């Protein structure tokens, strides 16, 4: 759920369309642990580190506030 949210949040960012598309495809990355490298590659390819860091901070904050069932 944490990584899947990145695809949705990336649509709100001012980043290239190709980067947004790659974030939307994040659910298809296998194994799941490879998602970290996948995001690093997007950051490097499009030079969008600051924007992605801010997005990740918001996603993690929202994730931490979810009720644990």
Image (cartoon, rainbow, N blue to C red):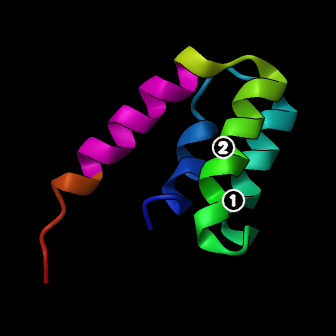
Q: Is residue 66 left or right of residue 17?
A: left
Q: Position of residue 19 (x, y in %)?
A: 79, 35
Q: Mark 2 vs mark 1: give the one in front.
A: 2
Q: Residue at x 76, y 26 (%)?
A: 44
For the C terminus, the quadrant is bottom left
Q: Position of residue 51 (x, y in %)?
A: 55, 20
Q: Position of residue 38 (x, y in %)?
A: 72, 49
Q: Residue at x 73, y 67 (%)?
A: 29
Q: Looking at the image, do the residues carrying marks 2 and 1 touch, with CB atoms under 8 Å apart?
A: yes
For the N terminus, the quadrant is bottom left
In space, the residues marked 2 and 1 are separated at their CA atoms by 8 Å
> Of the residues under marks 2 and 1, which one precedes in the sequence?
1
Q: Residue at x 64, y 38 (%)?
A: 11
Is 60 colored magenta in this rendering?
A: yes
- The mark found on residue 68 in the picture is none
The residue tagged 2 is 39
Residue 48 position (above or below residue 60): above
Q: Is residue 17 left or right of residue 14?
A: right
Quarter of the image where one finds residue 50: top right
Magenta extent: 51-62
Is 14 colored magenta in this rendering?
A: no
The residue tagged 1 is 26
18 or 50, nearer to the observer: 50
Q: Position of residue 45 (x, y in %)?
A: 84, 27
Residue 43 position (above or below residue 36): above
- Crowding around mark 1 (Cα neighbors within 10 Å: few <14, some 14 to 19, many 20+) is many
Q: Secondary structure at mark 1?
A: helix
């Amino acid at each position: 759920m944490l990584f899947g949210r990145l695809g949705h949040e990336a649509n709100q960012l001012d980043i290239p369309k190709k980067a947004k598309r790659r974030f939307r495809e994040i659910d298809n990355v296998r194994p799941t642990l490879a998602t970290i490298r996948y995001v690093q590659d997007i950051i490097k390819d499009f030079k969008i580190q600051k924007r992605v860091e801010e997005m990740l901070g918001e996603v993690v904050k929202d994730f931490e506030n979810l009720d644990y069932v």
